[in-house]
Image (cartoon, rainbow, N blue to C red):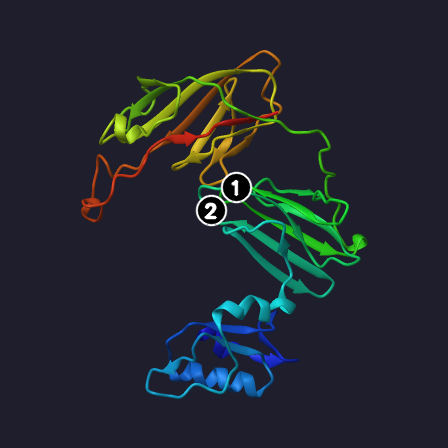
Amino acid sequence: MDTLKRAAVKDRAICVGTSAYHLLVVDRVEFLPDEAMELLRLFQLQGANVVFVDRAPEGIHGTKAPEIPLFPNGELLSRLERYRRCITATPEKWLRFYPYVQEGLTIYYFLNSSMTHQVDTNVSLPLETKSLVGYDALNQRLFTPERDESGKVALKLDIGESVLLLAAQQEDLPHGKAPDQNAREELPFQGPFSVSVADHTHMDHFEPLAVMEELEDVALLKPGFGGKIRYEATFQGKCRKIALGRCFDGVEVFVNGVSAGTRISYPYRFCVRDLTNDGTNTLRIETGTTLTNVVPDAMSQERPVPPQGIFGPVRLVR
């Protein structure tokens, strides 16, 4: 409501600050405040495009909905085709897409909202004569996205990963690193992992817990544990990156005794190109737990027991 109150209609678009929205969709809402109903009526009278989906809402105090076009839910996508800015080669349930159109520049924001599945597809964008540069905010780097002969953009996002694509005339864009033409090979990490734990009272004193061929939930092996968990293994040959798959809480990776960085959220992927050698490499992964297992407060007495550790699959990217 506060946002709608600040909005103004200009050139048939609903404008809030520097953003302009060409369509307002009220999707299957049963009731709205009377003030919101009046704002929708006013927007329509000023030329903005407003639509209801499946039903017209009622005012909380009985206010009748304004005469606004009503779309059946099954027809919504076809009716909105002219507003569509991105077409994926395959259905992508978890892919989120947000275009931000500015004068001379369009920013496309893609997000993989899944916590279990990767996104691997090609997307068609209305680029026309514009060039494209990608921005990886996690690693603070610009890159040139891969495109096929038809101009479709290759989009591969790990769990929880996002990316920005900037579209503008080439002279108005920063220079991005060209795509790597060398084929990348992803190999499953061949264990085993030696797992040890350090209690929260002695964080530097690790005791052996298990040897895992397949990664397991530490919460099941050591109920009530609070502290640090360490995974140790070796692998052969150089590689570009190490991807850990599913993890819980923050993770730090060490290769040959040198830290490759810390991640506190997805994607748990680490660049290790400069840390590996052609021979045997050591890998150490450290993560931790919360203290609610050992120092519970009133709010955590009845909470479910969260998983602990890393769950993989761990992969080497060569």
Q: Residue at x 43, y 77 (%)?
A: 55
Q: Is residue 9 left or right of residue 143?
A: left
Residue hosting label 1: 118
Q: Position of residue 212 (x, y in %)?
A: 37, 20
Task: Between residue 111 and residue 264, name the one nearer to us.
Answer: 111
Q: Residue at x 50, y 22 (%)?
A: 189
Q: Are marks 1 and 2 in contact (CB under 8 Å)?
A: yes
Q: Is residue 105 above or below residue 38?
A: above
Q: Is residue 153 above or below residue 287?
A: below
Q: Is residue 310 left or right of residue 80?
A: left
Figure quadrant of the C terminus = top right
Give the number of marks. 2
Instruction: Please state which amino acid type lies under the numbered disc 2.
Output: Ser
Instruction: Please state which amino acid type lies under the numbered disc 1.
Output: Gln
Q: Position of residue 222 (x, y in %)?
A: 25, 26
Residue hosting label 2: 114
Describe the element under mark 2 as helix, strand or loop.
loop
Rendered image quadrant of residue 16: bottom right
Q: Is residue 191 left or right of residue 142?
A: left
